[in-house]
Image (spheres, grey):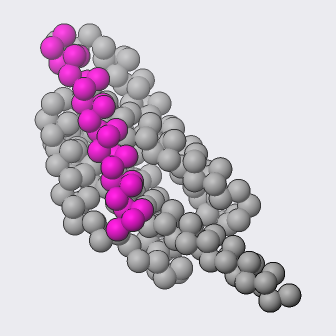
Amino acid sequence: MKKENMEEQNTSQNIKDTTDRMIRVNHAGEFGASRIYEGQLSVLAKSTVGQTIQDMADQEKDHLETFDKLIIERRIRPTALSPIWSLAGYTLGVVTARMGEKAAMACTVAVEEVIEEHYKTQYETLGENDPELSKIIDKFRLDEIEHKSISNNFINLNNSSESEQDENIYPLMSKAIKAGSKLAIWLSTRL
């Protein structure tokens, strides 16, 4: 009997550890995304894409508030890297916005591709172990897919508005942003 109880306690602790890491990294990610949009809006708020960015930023703010509450309710330590993600996110937002509206949208596509896959993996990992968190993650994953779609549509509609040289930088920029996003996920899960 004692062995079964210990196994059950270990399983419960493993699930809690897993969900704690998920909430920590998602909180960090939503914070970083909010900072990217703040940086983009500091440059593009009055541009043709400004309201679109604001709408996506508002959804990210809702996501962040949800994870803020979960961090507090579940007494989870946030990542120690928040100051770095604040500066890095804002800087990425400003730099891509200064490159132009299309670059800002390409940044969103790159980040959202990583986050969509990240949330999908989390959702599959959770299964029925934490229905509340599963529901939140799935809803936010759908929001991120929507952001990616909106950004892709903007890029496709404005395909001829930038030079060939600018066009050639987007695949390289996308790879760098995706790699940075994956590194931020890995680090935030652990620190």
The magenta stretch spans residue 166: yes
Q: Relative to residue 140, is residue 149 depicted above or below? A: above
Residue 92's quadrant in the figure? top left
Q: Quadrant of the N terminus?
A: bottom right
Which residue is most to the bottom?
A: 2
Q: Can I make out residue 164 in this image? A: yes
Give the x, y percent position of residue 106.
31, 30
Give the x, y percent position of residue 49.
29, 33
Q: Going 27% across and 55% down the picture, which residue do you hit?
A: 35
Q: Give the residues drawn in magenta, as a range.
A: 164-191
Q: Depth check: give the residue in front, 124 or 72.
A: 124
Q: Going 36% across and 17% down the picture, which residue do you hit?
A: 157
Give the x, y percent position of residue 118.
50, 47
Residue 167's quadrant in the figure? top left
Give the x, y percent position of residue 126.
65, 58
Q: Going 74% across and 61% down the picture, which residue do you hit?
A: 128
Q: Relative to residue 41, is residue 100 depicted above or below? A: above
Q: Quadrant of the C terminus?
A: bottom left
Q: Going 49% across and 66% down the picture, which residue do you hit?
A: 21
Q: Can I make out residue 64 in this image? A: no
Main secondary structure along the magenta-highlighted residues:
helix
Q: Depth check: give the residue in front, 116 or 12.
A: 12
The magenta stretch spans residue 18: no
Q: Relative to residue 100, is residue 71 depicted above or below? A: below
